[in-house]
Amino acid sequence: MFLRIVAAVAALWGASLSAQAQWPEKPVRLIVPYPAGGAADLPARIMAEGLTRKLGKPFIIENRAGAAGQIGTEYAVRATPDGYTFYCGPNGPIVLLPLLRKTSYQSTDLIPIAPYGELVYGIGTLKSFPVNNLKELVAHAKANPGKLSYSSPGAGSVTHLRMETFLKLADMQITHVPYRTGAEALPDLLAGRLDMMHDNIFFPQLRIGEAKMLGVLSARRHPEFPDVPTFAEQGFAIELPVWGGFMAPTGTPQAIMDTLGKVVNELNTDPETMAKMLKIGWLSYVATPQDLAKQLISQAEAYRTWVQNTNLKLE
């Protein structure tokens, strides 16, 4: 009897390993917690295209937007951990939202697998806006308190926190106007109904000279716009990076996560994929799951500090 049980368990284990070795055997869902067409959606689609090509099965984007990314993140956390549903999005909903309101998850409830890049955000304005850098912006805002406005892709997003952190450091007032995505805010910027936006959706207008960027909020300058200095270079050290990546619900087979992580990091060094990502404002890089786990922990602490300092509220 005991030997039959052992044999049955061994058979099941062998079948499980065989299934994992053949993964994926069917389409894989990538949960993006923001609407289609925004800064979080576009890189996911580029990565899905690459994964489909390399692994031979469709990787399908499923946009589950709402509540500043909370709805999609909660869905990913609760998903069946069978290796066919993954979170594919930015770090903000995972590390920031639990600090702003009650969520059904914590930053440790999704298992990091691999990044797809660091997002380079900047402050964009029309060419006609009467400032050209952050120092001039601070002077202009203080001379016109409460009269200027900026957009972010959502109240409670990391980009909202980073802009409010900048306002706090500069001791100035600029009205926040939240949108669901940067794509929705761009027409208002171009029509003059917004003074500036904290995003990267305006990069096409930047390329044709219709817009300008006052500063880059990332650890390094954007390779395509090397003349635009970072916030830190202009005296505002704001280390709240936005990165995007793949994460899995707890219980997902390790072998499947290893396979996905390996292929994602291959795409992160693929010249064609890197060029596509850079065009939409993402800087590709390679990292291990352990690297990402450490980043989540350290960033949660940094965000907690700045949430307290800025008294950030969901609007």
Image (spheres, grey):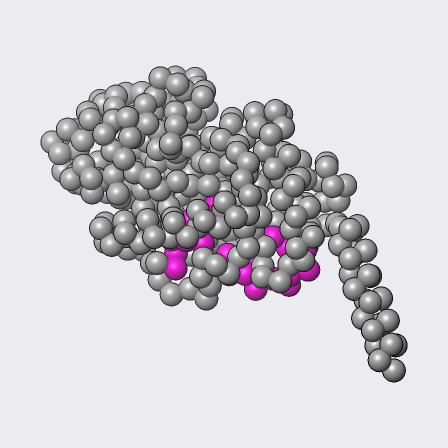
Tell me which residue sits at (38%, 48%) in the image: 299
Q: Position of residue 48 (x, y in %)?
A: 64, 40
Residue 31 in the figure: left or right of residue 99: right
Specify the quadrant of the image occupied by residue 98. Answer: bottom left
Q: Where is residue 257 in the image (x, y as percent from the top left)?
A: 65, 51
Q: Nearer the viewer, residue 127 or 161?
A: 161
Judge whether residue 89 can be spotted in this image.
no
Residue sitting farthest toward the bottom: 1
Q: Position of residue 272 (x, y in %)?
A: 62, 25
Tell me which residue sits at (46%, 36%) in the image: 118
Q: Position of residue 203 (x, y in %)?
A: 43, 26
Rendered-image quadrant of the N terminus = bottom right
Specify the quadrant of the image occupied by residue 212. Answer: top left
State the count of labels: 0
Tell me which residue sits at (61%, 24%) in the image: 271
Residue 301 in the figure: left or right of residue 114: left
Is 82 inside the magenta-drawn segment?
A: yes
Judge whether residue 224 can be spotted in this image.
yes
Above or below, 295 relative to 251: above
Q: Nearer the viewer, residue 201 or 2?
A: 2
Specify the quadrant of the image occupied by residue 242. Answer: top left
Residue 121 in the figure: left or right of residue 10: left
Tell me which residue sits at (23%, 23%) in the image: 131
Q: Give the range drawn in magenta.
A: 73-98
